[in-house]
Image (cartoon, grey):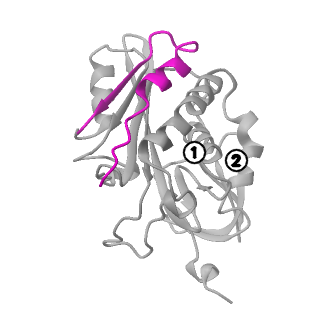
Amino acid sequence: MITITPWPAEAIWQQIYPLLPDFTVEVLPEIDSSNSELMRRARAGQHEPTLLVAERQTAGRGRMGRVWQSQPGDSLTFSISLPLAPRDWSGLSLAVGLSLAESLHPDVGLKWPNDLWLQDRKLGGILVEAASMGGRSQVVVGVGLNIRPCPADGLNTPPAALTECLPDLTAPACLARVVAPLIEVLLAFESQGFVPLQKRFEVRDVLKDRRVHTSDGLVGVALGVGANGAFRLQTETGVQEITSAEVSVRPFLEENKPC
């Protein structure tokens, strides 16, 4: 017998209401992409703070145009839309990842700029988008987390799943863990930026002190992230700072082989 766990929409709304009185929570059984839907609403002039959960996505989007499809129960996919106008947007995706990792489990790490990792395997991803209409700035933060193991079709390494470290976790329970802390971090980021979070990010940084290579041909040792959220790389010619989220950074695989 399959037990269906209800979504904690009312409980989450009660948590967020003191911070955002016009906050709404929506759960849809199927949608193309929760990020795409909230971006459409933002461009249409809808600026209410919104949490949109998609039980199934048919055209979910990740960073650099990657596809993220989800099936009910196997993953948690949601997006949050907020009117947000920070002085400096640098490091926003790092702040989101940090909040999620700290809410989930001590073993969840962060791979610059917006992946969550568990045991050197991808556990989840983040997509941050912004829209500006009529002088108002709206940010949409999309999150995809693997709850249960999923196929490794076309991947060199099987994805990680949260049930590996939290065996009884369900998608609704995971949502209840992460949303309130995430919104608190987003609101704090608007006034304080990434600087107060830099040291906490370093604790979760899975690349720091490792030999890595980038998609644009750089090789070196990861030095961590700067106060502006930039990835710092020690190369033979000096320290390089990478700020573009379009550049992918990966550790050399031989580091992960058993001795």
List the residue tagged with mark 2: 201
Q: Nearer the viewer, residue 5 or 89?
A: 5
Q: Is residue 163 above or below residue 72?
A: below
In what element is the residue under mark 2? helix
* Element under disc 1: helix
User: Could you tell me the amino acid type at mark 1?
Assistant: Gly
- Quick check: 10 above or below 258? above
Range drawn in magenta: 1-29
Determine which residue is flagged by label 1: 97
Tell me where residue 112 sits by quadrant: bottom right
Q: Is residue 90 left or right of residue 215?
A: right
Q: Closest to the observer: 72 or 203? A: 72
What x and y, as percent, mark residue 247?
A: 49, 56
Numbered mark located on residue 192 in the image: none
Quadrant position of residue 140: top left
- Of the 4 image quadrants, the one containing the C terminus is bottom right
| CB contact under 8 Å: marks 2 and 1 | yes
The image shows residue 244 at horizontal and vertical percentages of 52, 48
Q: Residues within 10 Å of mark 2 (few under 14, many from 20)?
A: many
Give the residue drawn at x 49%, y 43%: 174
Q: Residue at x 56, y 79 (%)?
A: 253
Q: Is residue 169 left or right of residue 70?
A: right
Q: Residues within 10 Å of mark 1 (few under 14, many from 20)?
A: many
Judge left or right: residue 231 versus residue 73: right
Give the camera-side residue of 27 and 42.
Answer: 27
For the point 37% across and 36% down, the residue is 6
